[in-house]
Image (cartoon, coloured by chain):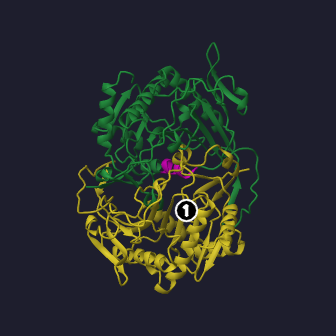
Chain colours: A green, B yellow
Amino acid sequence: MSTLRQDPTTRAWTIVAPRRAARPHFAVIVRAPDQPEHDPNCPFCPGNESMTPPEVHRISNGAGWHVRVVGNLYPALGGDGAADGNGSGLFRERPGVGTHEVIIESPRHNARLDEMSVEDVGAVLLAWRERYRDLEGREETGAVVVFKNAGPMAGTSLNHPHSQVVATPVIPPEVLRRFEVAKDYFEGTGRRLYDDLILSERTAGERVLEERGTFVAFVPFAAPGPFETWIAPTAPQPSFAQLRDPDIPDLAWLLKRTLRAVRLTNDDPDFNVVVASAPAGQEAGSWFSWHIKVLPRLTTAAGFELGSGMSINPVPPETAASEMREVLREDALA
Amino acid sequence: MSTLRQDPTTRAWTIVAPRRAARPHFAVIVRAPDQPEHDPNCPFCPGNESMTPPEVHRISNGAGWHVRVVGNLYPALGGDGAADGNGSGLFRERPGVGTHEVIIESPRHNARLDEMSVEDVGAVLLAWRERYRDLEGREETGAVVVFKNAGPMAGTSLNHPHSQVVATPVIPPEVLRRFEVAKDYFEGTGRRLYDDLILSERTAGERVLEERGTFVAFVPFAAPGPFETWIAPTAPQPSFAQLRDPDIPDLAWLLKRTLRAVRLTNDDPDFNVVVASAPAGQEAGSWFSWHIKVLPRLTTAAGFELGSGMSINPVPPETAASEMREVLREDALA
């Protein structure tokens, strides 16, 4: 029997409908062929640095670069463009100012976060935070969105491992919503939503994947999609900019393990990773806490989801967490 | 150069970024093979009526059924189920009561709305409205969502033409949002948002696809996705339940033509259709108006969209409307 569950961080409803998993299909799967360690035609491979827009940041080791950040060749936002429509009446329009960068996660064309060393994953997280801090500080920035698209169903066709960071001139609706829901909770209860949420999940236990240092990974009670997993600091930090250097190895360990668990439970699905953080300049909003969402693309948003804003999740979060814990126990690489 | 446009009906922002259309890929395309007019294994084909859950409605002609409405074999909502989790604290849960039905649009396995007669499309719209009226009137219903998923990228793998109707026990967030944004506009201006919107679009003209009777089809100024087209009554009606019989042929004509234009401009893409309507029992909310959204699945929501709630549209709405008008002028079938 299906149930409706409400996400306390967004107030969105998810329909948890286990019987729908018996449907003839689950999601479209499109597999990329196995990739070489180096692709001479890949703009992100070493030796082809001149094929990308200018480099804005790099993390080096002795011999070359470990992580490289460049402009996006096809930016969604950028430059100084003036809006060319009319900005009046019901046709509100503004220039698409902002920044769109690509974080090349490894010199190796076929590297994967779930197979990289914890140290190398940590270098990627460090690059995320460095770019977040820089872009957040710019006057025109409303929010910074860090994300990763892995595979065609997740919105990318580039195989070389990469993530992205976008600085928007407005506060995007989902960023604002999460922030305001947490503020409203604080004003109504005097408590911090993410303190209560993490305490509730740790107390219940059944949806917790793992803990490490000051972080916990769990499948949230009202997860909109199957195997969606969040990684959150156990002591709230409003902004991802506040992630401290000494905490990065633990976060990297949990992210790698979570991605490993997603891969092993679901035959290596495409996935997104999103950093949910406060609007720019809101480090003092102590009622909020940043968190990372790992979103396997196992279902397709159809007309119902598009029209209602509700989600349908065919895998109960407790089942997903249990299966993920199980594969991690049995996997030597994880 | 990209611009940000705000949808006045949801206040969501779309990034219109034409340069991104030059990216190596646009969307995953998965084609179903050509279908026969009758498939002996299809549960929706004539002769297999016993393979479906019980019939709740039918529209007949002399020889048999034209349109048939049955329960969904894998309902997202339904029955009397009690929530089996705890409904307390941050874990809010409620029973998944509601209704989930399938509208079989034609006895012909390979029929398509854009190739059917206007009369046959009208029979489908009539079935939508009849089921909407019936389900809306039930005490437990918060809203009724009518939608169609066409093709795997739109969330279906069943080839036989069908649409769906779901009655939810809560008012879904997008339904509530559209209703409240329109109410807020009315309270702030004394005018009806959809009157102003449709007047603005008709005055501008460049995004209008066609008009017919008391309906207009247009690509909205801030369309979240490429070639997204709305069909709206020119005189607002809050609820889809209020669609009048004599207006159905004009609406059917516009829907058929819009789907034809989407098909011809984009090599027959998968698509969704969604009826945006008022919450159940809100026929008196005269500040609102139902409208139909045709949503070709030409892009994939990636990490940025999932994390921000903003959309990226690589095709300016003016360009999409112009291309659609062009193919309709040249197409004999449309």
Horizontally, is B330 left or right of A242 in the view?
Answer: right
In x, y percent, where is residue A260? 41, 30
Q: Is residue B19 above or below residue B197?
A: above
Q: Where residue B105 sits: x, y (%)?
A: 41, 71
Closer-to-camera residue (A241/B135): B135
Q: Compared to A17, does B163 lie above or below? A: below
Name the quadrant of the C terminus of chain A. Answer: top left
The front one of B89 and B38 is B38
Instruction: Kindly identify the residue that appears in the image at 31 percent across and 58 percent down.
Output: B74
Residue B73 screen position, x and y as percent: 29, 61
Query: Residue A101: x, y in percent?
Result: 65, 37
Q: Identify the chain of the residue marked 1, using the numbered disc in the image.
A: B
Q: Secondary structure at mark 1?
A: loop
In this rendering, is residue A104 above or below A308?
above
The residue that mark 1 highlights is: B10
Magenta stretch: give its range.
A172-180
Is B64 left or right of B217, judged from the image as shown? left
Left or right: B48 in relation to A67: left
Image quarter in which the N terminus of chain A is found: bottom left
For the stretch drawn in magenta, the main secondary structure is: helix
In front of the other: B181 or B245: B245
**What residue occupies the far top of the structure in this picture?**
A62
Residue B190 appears anywhere in the view: no
Q: Is residue A174 magenta?
A: yes
Give me the residue at 49% from left, 23% from top.
A116
Identified by mark 1, the residue type is Thr
Q: Residues within 10 Å of mark 1 (few under 14, many from 20)?
A: some
